[in-house]
Amino acid sequence: MKNLKTSLVMVVLLIPLYLVFTMLNGSAAQADSDNHESAEHMALESSPDHEALETKVPSGKLAEVRAFKNLVASDEKSLSEAKAIYGGKGTCFNCHGEKGMGDGELASSFDPKPRNFTIPVWQKVRTDGEIFWIITNGTESGMPPFGDMLSDEEKWGLVNYIRELGKTGGVANKSN
Ligand code: HEC
C-alpha cells in the first residue's frame, strides 16, 4: 500500500515535469530555427546582388520579353556607336557611371540606386530582352523610359554595350 502511494506521487509529479521539459525543449528548438532563418534572410537582404536578381519587368510580360531577339550584332562598330549614346544623348553615364558601376554623378539621389552592370550574377540572370524592355519603358523607381528617344537598333546596341561593361568595364577601358 505504501509502495502504491509512492508510485502515485511519483507519477503525479513526473507527468507535469515531463510536460514542462518537452515544452521548453520544443520552444528552444523553435527559437533556434527562427534564428537560423533570420540569419540567412539577413545575409541575403544585405547582399547588393540579391536586389539585383529581381527583374524590373512586370511578371505578366516576362515570358514575352525574355523571348525578344537581339537585332544587333555585338561588333566593334555597333559597340562604339552604343558607347557614344551611353556617354552622350542617352545620358546613361550620368546615373550608371562611365564604367557601368552604378556610380554616376546623379546616382546618390536614387533609391534603389542605378543598376551596377558589373555585378556578375546580374549579367547572368538578366536576359537581353529584359534589358531592352527596361531601356524602352523605364521603371517606376527611377529609371527613365527611352522609348521615344532611341530607336530599337540603338537600344539593342546599348544592351550589347551593357554586356561589354559587365565583361571589361566597357570598350571605354580598351580605347582610353
Ligand atoms: C536619371 C538616372 C538614370 C539614367 C539617365 C539612366 N538610368 Fe538606368 N536606371 C536608373 C535607376 C535609378 C535604375 C534602378 C531602377 C529600379 O531599380 O527600379 C536603373 C535601372 C536600369 C536598368 C535595369 C537593370 C535591372 O535591374 O534589370 C537598365 C538595363 C538600365 N537602367 C539601363 C540604362 C541605360 C541603357 C540608360 C541610358 C540610355 C540608362 N539606364 C539611363 C537610373 C538611370
Image: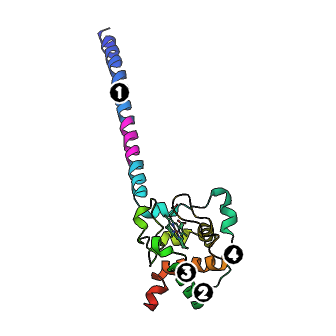
Query: What residue sits right under mark 1 in the picture?
Result: 20
Q: In which quarter of the image is the N terminus?
A: top left
Which residue corresponds to the image point at 51% horizontal and 69% vertical from the top-left?
122
Observer able to see residue 161: yes
Disc 1 or 4, which lies upstream in sequence? 1
Marks 1/3: CA–CA distance = 70 Å
Which portion, as a residue range, is magenta?
A: 27-35
**In the displayed structure image, the side of residue 125 where residue 94 appears, left or right:** left
13 or 27: nearer the viewer: 27
Disc 1 or 3, which lies upstream in sequence? 1
Q: What element carries label 3?
A: helix
**In the displayed structure image, the side of residue 93 where residue 3 appears, left or right:** left
Q: What element carries label 4?
A: loop
Q: In this view, does 138 lie above or below 41?
A: below
Question: Of discs 3 and 2, which sits in the foreground?
Answer: 3
Q: Is mark 1 on a helix, strand or loop?
A: helix
Query: What residue sits right under mark 3 in the picture?
Result: 85
Residue 143 on the magenta segment: no
18 or 162: nearer the viewer: 162
Query: What residue sits right under mark 2 in the picture?
Result: 78
Which residue corresponds to the image point at 37% horizontal and 46% vertical from the top-left?
35
**In the displayed structure image, the side of residue 135 where residue 165 appears, left or right:** left
Q: What residue type is labelled 3?
A: Ile
